[in-house]
Image: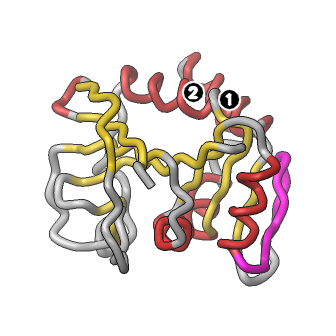
Amino acid sequence: MGNLIYGMNVSLDGYIADTEGDISWGVSTEELFRWWLEEEQAVSLMLYGRKLWETMSPYWPTGDKAPDARSDQVDYARNWRDTPKIVFASDSLPLDWNTRLATGNAVAEIRALKEQVNGSIRIGGASLASAAMRAGLIDEYAVVTHPVLLGGGNPFFCLLDQHVHLELVETRVFDGGVTMNRYRSET
């Protein structure tokens, strides 16, 4: 059975993007970028919401060819292209790079994928993750907290109908005061 992981860069006040959709505040040091690379290399399947797909897909398909790309960025781009991806959107999108579109019921599809995939599945995008969170499908949260307050924007966590108890299983501090806390869902 697949292990569904939701992890993103988060401001101290709980947002993944500011009110304008900007994520540039989540500056990634080489140490943090390498950690994200290792996280991505460990997954069997990536699930994207439309907005996150539109953020990632313009750069990463050819990111390894950028003249100033570091070796870890080259590795990330290659892994990104090679890893199977599903984008959840209500209408057609230009897709390539080992990606397919899912337009149906996201919760039902994610539930089925968890049954089919042997390994870790990473879910990205707050709206898509919110649907999975409300359905109790997320097994693990990797909250990478940056020391910045945004005051509003796109929240990492959604409103829930019931409590979700979590167990802290790992903490790591990166350069610049960035902290990663990994939690397992106890449900």
The span shown in magenta is 94-105
Q: Main secondary structure of the magenta part?
A: loop
Local secondary structure at mark 1:
helix
Left or right of 124, for residue 48: right
Q: Which residue is mark 2?
A: 73
Residue 169 percent location from the top left of the image = 34, 31
The amino acid sitting under disc 1 is: Asp
Asked whether 22 or 16 is in front, the reply is 16
Residue 45 percent location from the top left of the image = 72, 44
Left or right of 83, for residue 36: left
> How many other residues sit within 10 Å of disc 1, few (<14), some (14-19) or many (≥20)?
some
Residue 92 percent location from the top left of the image = 81, 78
Q: Quadrant of residue 68?
A: top right
User: Most extreme residue toward the front, as rendered?
Assistant: 187
Q: Residue at x 15, y 69 (%)?
A: 151
Q: Is residue 29 magenta?
A: no
Q: Is residue 96 magenta?
A: yes
Say above or below: 59 vs 68.
Answer: below
> How many other residues sit within 10 Å of disc 2, few (<14), some (14-19) or many (≥20)?
many
User: Most extreme residue toward the top, as rendered?
Assistant: 71
Q: Is residue 68 visible?
A: no
Query: Which image quarter holds the C terminus?
Result: bottom left
Query: Which image quarter holds the N terminus?
Result: top right
Inter-mark Cα distance, 2 to 1:
6 Å
> Can you tell which mark lies on residue 64?
1
Say above or below: 76 vs 130.
Answer: above
Q: Are marks 2 and 1 in contact (CB under 8 Å)?
A: yes
